[in-house]
Image (tube, coloured by chain):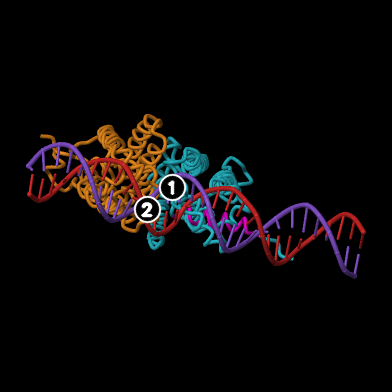
Chain colours: A orange, B cyan, C red, D purple
Amino acid sequence: MEKSNTREEILEAALDLFAVNGYEATSISQLADAVGIRKASLYSHFANKQDILDTIVETVLKGYADHSIFVRANWDDPEFTKDKTGMKAEDVAKLVQGQLRYILHDPRISRSRKMLTIEQFRNAELAELQTKQNYENVLNYFMGMMRFLIREGTLRNADTEIMAAQFSSPITVWINLCDREPDREDEVMELVRKHVMQFFEIYRK
Amino acid sequence: MEKSNTREEILEAALDLFAVNGYEATSISQLADAVGIRKASLYSHFANKQDILDTIVETVLKGYADHSIFVRANWDDPEFTKDKTGMKAEDVAKLVQGQLRYILHDPRISRSRKMLTIEQFRNAELAELQTKQNYENVLNYFMGMMRFLIREGTLRNADTEIMAAQFSSPITVWINLCDREPDREDEVMELVRKHVMQFFEIYRK
DNA sequence: TTATACCTAACGTTCGTTCGTTAGTCAATA
DNA sequence: TATTGACTAACGAACGAACGTTAGGTATAA
């Protein structure tokens, strides 16, 4: 007994297409072709085209915004930081490289990111999500990390909001670069390593 | 005797619409309405829709890529740096804030930037332009600035590529934030000031 | 039997584009 | 000076194709 998952396949294919072409420029026919059904059959699963977008926003985008590593992490929680005490620059570089690899290659995350990038100027709700997901949450996470590293005595005391911005923004920019030109991932990984090492050097206590 | 400039008005309105909706999602009727003519009249000035996009890319986008402040500036040219010797952190902050204001509000630049952001995943030529214009050129400019500041003895010696990335990336990220939420410009200006001050503090010789 | 998932066919609308026409400008010609 | 003809920029009307959507039928499985 095979449970049908056409609905999920539609959402998957839709996110795929929206992430490259955007919502308006993606047609129902294109989407149906990608799934392998007739376009009329889409209406057995969704009320209309807008409903598909709404469902993606509701389930995929918002789901990620609330459950990403940047939201779940809590640098004030001893349980979270217990294996992070005494982290050296190289350890943080490795940690960040690992997170970067994940963020770049997880299909759900990378498609969500691209789609938000494309739709941010037309859809106020998605603009808000983009700011929250790829700016505020990231900044908060690294502010927590900076406070932790200052508390530990690894880094010197300074404005943690600025520190977090200086630490995370190059990575954000390089993520965007990799989204455009995936071939440059190795180059970016090396830049990230250098960036983290140099950051620890200049902020050393 | 009034010389008609309908062709320029079409390009202007097209860039306006493409920067928000993207190329595919902008219709010829929309564009004609924006200009105030019938859609058939557009074909007195352009062969087809693609021709409008090509003309914008050729004249507006590429023109900006080659003549932006980030390309024209040459930190090895004494003529360019003669009024920049002895720059303190506050001076650089003011300089950067001025450049930021210009980049945010110049209609040609800001529309180009938004359009490239929207179209980067569908059009390889525009992806290339986006990387060149909003990454490589910016990075090169600030690498020149870093070399200059090191040469002058203002900043300590370090990898200038990483320094430039750490200096410019927060600004790039904040530009994107302002494109989404223009109301946050004042907040961003203050962040830029703090960022530049703190950058000079930690890289002080 | 009822419900579901898919289908074909068709709907009215909008898409980008073409056509032929018209009004206005300008230079050359009568 | 007045007339002609070429050129331009705008127009209304229409084109076939594609758009999102609906209606109705059919097969499968609970």
Label 1 Cα crowd, 10 Å radius (few <14 / some 14-19 / many 20+): many
Q: Which chain letter goes with mark 2? A: A
Q: Mark 2 points at which residue?
A: A120
- Name the image quarter holding the C terminus of chain B: top left
Residue B24 placement, left or right of A75 = right
- Name the image quarter holding the N terminus of chain B: bottom right
Q: Name the residue under label 1.
A: B117
- Residue range corresponding to the magenta coloring: B5-20
Examine the rendered structure and indicate whether residue B169 appears above or below residue B9: above
Measure the C-alpha gap from mark 1 to mark 2: 10 Å
Say which mark, if any, is on residue A106.
Answer: none
Q: Which chain letter goes with mark 1? A: B
Please tell me which residue lies in front, D21 or C26.
Answer: D21
What is the x, y in percent for residue A87?
A: 22, 36
Labels 1 & 2 near each other (Cβ < 8 A): yes
Examine the rendered structure and indicate whether residue D12 appears above or below residue A133: below
Q: What element carries label 1?
A: helix
The amino acid type found where label 2 is placed reads: Gln
Q: Is residue A138 visible?
A: yes
Q: Is residue B69 visible?
A: no
